[in-house]
Image (spheres, helix red, strand yellow):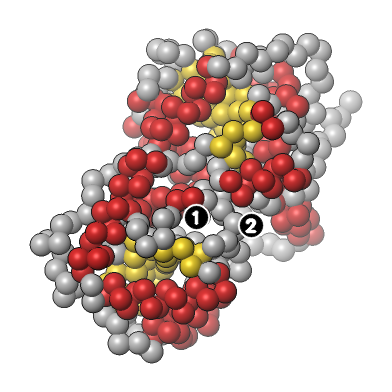
Amino acid sequence: MTNTLGTIVIGTSAPPDKGSGISTFCKELAISLQALGFDVAYVCPVTESMCWFDEYSSINPVMFNPESDPEKQTMNILSQINGVSKLIGVINNDNIFLQSLAPVINAPFLSVVHMLKTTIFESAILNHEYIDNIIVICNDMYFEVCRRTNIPQHKICLVYNGVKVEAQKLSIAENPESQPLILIAGGGYSNAKGGKQLIKLIELLKNSNIDFEYISFGIIPNNVRKMTNSDSRFTFIERLAREDYLSIVKKGDIFLFPSKLEGCPMSLLESMNYGLIPLVSDGKGAMKEIVQHGIDGYLLPSCTWAKEALDIVEKLSINNPKKNQMSLASSKKIECNFNSSETASHLVSLLKNTEPSKQIDIKIKFHKWHRLPIPLTKKWHYKMIIRRVCFRFGLIKEHQVKK
């Protein structure tokens, strides 16, 4: 590593060519830290492609096999971190092996809480007595951490996620009113993501006279496919590389996001970055802090989201000046309050203003990998069922070292 201001360690549970929200956050953060003059040691599972690392010379991989022996993999990570000169600190994001090392890394250690449930939440607060700052990404998450743990208030900090600021959308003259409204569905169809309300909206749209194009990504329920099978206005796309996904999103007008349980959703920030007008719900998460109702988007009640969303889509489809005004306000919100450079600067400031106390003769407690198998196996044997149950209910399993 060619140190400039020093090296910051970023831990993540997915390689740069995999994952979704947390992986996107980590990549954006790493790029912003490089722009600020830091080298980055990127602790992640083994990757099939090194293209992302090849693109950024100051971001160096520290890879491990999450399905291999936890003790060996954890100690390998520690060995590589100990080899870093001028270590500024650690920013961990859902990496249980790195979190296990918090007691023995003599540098400021930040742990980012990305979800309110599952092993993602539990791994973020593991070893919290050795963590210098617990980072929450929305106020709902802050209150949940206070309710469920005894972590001192002074150790908890709110830092919003951020994305790289992009150019604003087309002007009114370049975006004629005659074009159909492009609706981008974000989040998916699970209950936590507000899937029932999204399906209700599809039913309402199907029977409306609105000129629109609906685009959805990822796994689509069979009943939704059947419902829209003969309607060319609906397009369903399987999982894409992030660049391909964003190239479609940036052409959209409205971002449909009825999710009931989030942290600080990267997909929402990405869509607003391109000027899409968000239609979010009042669920738990940063949606209430990101969207200013009626100015840069709409914050709708979860129970009536579909009905209210249809009314807004209809109004915006015939009111181009209003749509363009809100689109500009949406992208401006990201530029001013939720850009990745600001996120990185806040985290760097926390690292620089922390003096960790040395930990002497602390015994490392090793933990088994807390996420589902990589790659996700389709074989439903008992071990797979156990992994799913543990992940869902936030059960962290300690690895027993053989003597």
Q: Nearer the viewer, residue 100 or 147?
A: 147
Question: In front: 330, or 37?
Answer: 330
Which disc is residue 287 wearing?
Answer: 1
The answer to whether residue 90 is left or right of residue 16 is right
Instruction: Say which residue label 2 marks.
Output: 377
Q: Is residue 328 among what the camera can see?
A: yes
Q: Is residue 65 above or below residue 129?
A: below
Kind of residue indicated by mark 1: Met
Q: Quadrant of residue 43?
A: top right
Q: Dot 1 lies on which element?
A: helix
Q: Residue at x 55, y 42 (%)?
A: 137
Location of residue 392 in the rendering, given as x and y in whole percent from the top left corner: 72, 56
Report the residue at 53% width, 69% height from top.
301
Residue 214 position, x and y percent, is 35, 73
Instruction: Look at the image and tell me in which quarter the N terminus lies.
Output: top left
Viewer-side residue, 322 vs 165: 322
**Quick one: which residue is furthest to the right in this view?**
403
